Image: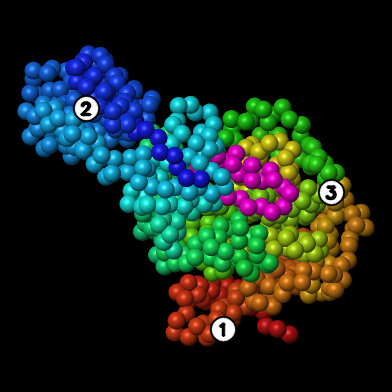
Amino acid sequence: MTNDHRPVRILVVENDSTWRSDHERNLKRWGYQPFIVSGSRRRLLDAAMERSKHDRCHLALVDMRLIDDDSSDDITGLELVASLQPTIAIVVSSSDDRRKAVAALREYRAVNFVGKEDGPAALKTAISEAMRDFAIGARHLSIFWSHDLSSSAIRTQMFPDKTGIPDDEIDDLIGRLFAQANHVRLTLVADDRESSDRDVSDATVVLRRKSRVFLAEVDQQPALLVVKLADPDKIMREADNFDRYVKLGVSNNYIPVKESQCTLWDVGAIAYRYIGANGLGNKYGPQTLTTAFRRAENSAQITPSLRFFFDLHGWGHWYRTRLETLTTSLVTAYDQIWRNALSQNYSAWQTQTSTRRFGGFEALLPNPPCWFVQNYHLCEHLRQLRQAITHGDLHGDNLFVDERAAWPIDFERTGYGPLLRDFVELIQDLTTRIACFGDDDLPLIYELAVAICVPERPNEPMQPTAALLSHPEARKLFEVVQELQLLAAERAQYDDRREYLWGLLCNHLFVASKLPPESPRWLRTMLFAAVICQRLDRWDRSSWMPVDWPAIAFVDRSAGNSASVLACEDATQSSAIAHVPASHPLSTDIPLQQQGLLDVSLPDQDTATSITHTGDAERTHLQTLRDMKLKRLHVLQLQVATFGIQAPPHVVIEMEELQKEIASLDAHEPPRAST
């Protein structure tokens, strides 16, 4: 839809009633909508500021002497100008004030001076020039919105509880953002989920309804811009964070560049250009991670871009520089980020039952809110917690990716946060929103949650289950989460895996607090949280799963059958052991192991024993980790051979990192000689 051209709103601030009447009559004759304020001395100034804000006036005609017409020292009109912004002001006063006013225009941020003796034609010209120079009212611009949107529709979506916002304010904002353009086409970066689980799209709106992100095509130019709309204070904060952390904080060749920004009374906008993102938004160009994941046939189409994003020359460098000690508990740190969204629910959560069932999943599990209120003090036992510069809102719609690179958007919350903040936010979004599951897939969510909770060390790989591997979407998700968890261990180099689980639990509870209770995503989120609660509650026990929880068959493809079910409280649970032949039907995709991009196969028998808590296999674990890194290094070396001297910098950098990590593993624990 295109923008509608509505009358430009012009405020008249004049202490002389005759001049007020003349201005009002002329403005109406010229097709403008005048807003008149009256009063004397301070009341006139207050009325002008209130009317400018209330009626969102585009322009203001301000007399220079508003207190004392006979005093050449009276410049109250000039002093008022800054208080009227974002209203654009033209000073209209006696010609005797011209020299002083013109000299002070820049200081007081007025845009022009017109002498009262210059006549109506001069004033009309000054108004036209201001409208042209500042793109007021977007009258120069044709705006085309996707998804049947319009300026008024976006206003209603973003600010449903705020009254008085003009229908055309967002059109006006876009006009000022692209002051030199003739045509702008804006396409909403939206959740395009193809499954029947429509609550996901709605939930995304609930979680961040006060901002919108668009791809902008300007005058049919091939390079698209990313435009974010949000509250003016948020846009100012985002621009400041970009200048502080992103502008010079990312050193690779795939970076955002701030093009322009603008704020009006109720909404602001910021536009970015993305270096290296050829074809951004096109079918075969970079897409949001949400879209890319859903279109991907396997995890190999996703994991390289995630590794690129957390590369040491990208966002990953923040995990090596400017680290600080976290001076609060982990729960408190997350709660403060979300403006006490957790703690303000404590009273209500305390009244809930301690256990519950979720949807059609019949097992009785801890009720996460109740368990959290009773046990969040346990995270105080975590030691040596650190904080780093984090993106702060790393969900799937804030990251554009292609087959090899990634570009972040939305830096409003960028800054210091818990060390694993970005990883847990992204994993939470992938597992409960982005991945496409049906209402009857809660057992798969349960198995994935258990698989995430089993490892005891940060760099310990997860074990797949037969059910996860036989479901293409679940398998893809498992492998992407596997990669992110290992990346977190590599980059953050944290020591206690409970730090990761507590962060994940906090994120699940925060997201659930914003979702409609019992909705599909809410059920997935709470089921994940329940399994994490059980794991944290019995962290030091060799058997942490209750006997009545469904048994899980962990697949050992190297041995030709499944590993034993995770040990439970009751030793008789061994009767539930399942064995899955190696020929168990899996996805028809080429296994990632054969591509050398990801190894999710079980470690050897010694390591499997350690996972079921029947022995110590530290040496074997280090050997497995070394083998994984060595395999990845060999793949990259083959890629470099194909690139020749034009190998991408991020490939060379990753090879250097892997070589250092392999050397470090060799120094820590030499590999056992084969027999």
Labels 3, 1: front one: 1
Please, what is the three-letter code of the amino acid marked with disc 3? Trp
In this rendered view, identify the residue nearer to me: 172 or 468. Answer: 172
- In the displayed image of the protein, which residue is found farthest to the front? 29
Q: Picture coordinates of residue 672 (x, y %)?
A: 67, 79
Left or right: 380 with respect to 390? right
The residue shown at (53%, 63%) is: 282
Cβ atoms under marks 2 and 3 closer than 8 Å? no
Residue tagged 3: 549
Q: Secondary structure at mark 2?
A: strand
Q: Earlier in the sequence, mark 1 or mark 2?
A: 2
Left or right: 298 with respect to 415? right
Left or right: 382 with respect to 217? right
Residue tagged 2: 62
Q: Picture coordinates of residue 526 (x, y %)?
A: 71, 43
Please, what is the three-letter code of the amino acid marked with disc 2? Val
The residue shown at (77%, 69%) is: 587
Q: Secondary structure at mark 3?
A: loop
Does residue 216 show up?
A: yes
The residue shown at (73%, 30%) is: 352
Residue tagged 1: 638
Please, what is the three-letter code of the amino acid marked with disc 1? Leu
Provide the residue span drawn in magenta.
190-212
